[in-house]
Image: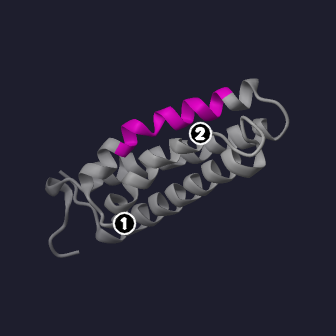
Amino acid sequence: MPRTPRHILRLLRVCTCAALLALIALCLASELWLAPLRPGGSWLVLKVLPLLAALPGVLAPRRYTYQWLSLAIWLYVAWGAVNASSGTGAAVALGALEALLASALFVACALFARFSAPSRLRPDA
């Protein structure tokens, strides 16, 4: 089985952290200020909580967190796609951006989880 160099894992970790932080910021901004469901914000901002729960494990990095996040992120892809296709005004662009960021986060998480398997790590790299 081919081994994975550690610099690739570092790159995937940085991509995952960047996408996760950007998605958290986007969800907070869109639900509180940019395009809230109701004027002044809504309880939908709580959808950020699972992303915040994943943040310590992504920063650590814990492989298990990357695995479950790669499954949970599909809820954000779906929510973004629904907003992009049925929203009005700024919600359309924000929904498309949310779906795009969530998709990028999925790719980075899935690749990190795959390449960080103990059987793929290079002890000397």
Q: Nearer the viewer, residue 94 or 105?
A: 94
Q: Which mark is residue 59?
A: 1
Start and end of the magenta stretch? 69-82
Taking 71 as reference, is 49 left or right?
Answer: right
Q: Kindly identify the amino acid type of the residue bearing the numbered disc 2.
A: Trp
- Main SS of residues in magenta: helix
For the view shown, which residue lies furthest in the front direction? Answer: 40
Residue 78 sits above or below residue 54 on the image: above
Query: Which of the two marks, 1 or 2, is nearer to us in this view?
Result: 2
Taking 115 as reference, is 45 left or right?
Answer: right
Residue at image position (34%, 64%) is: 9
For the view shown, which residue lies furthest in the bottom direction? Answer: 124
Residue 82 in the image: state x and y as whole percent: 65, 26
Residue on which disc 2 sits:
43
Q: Nearer the viewer, residue 87 or 120?
A: 87
Q: Looking at the figure, which quarter contains the C terminus?
A: bottom left
Residue 99 in the image: state x and y as whole percent: 61, 39
Taking 110 as reference, is 41 left or right?
Answer: right
Residue at image position (44%, 54%) is: 52
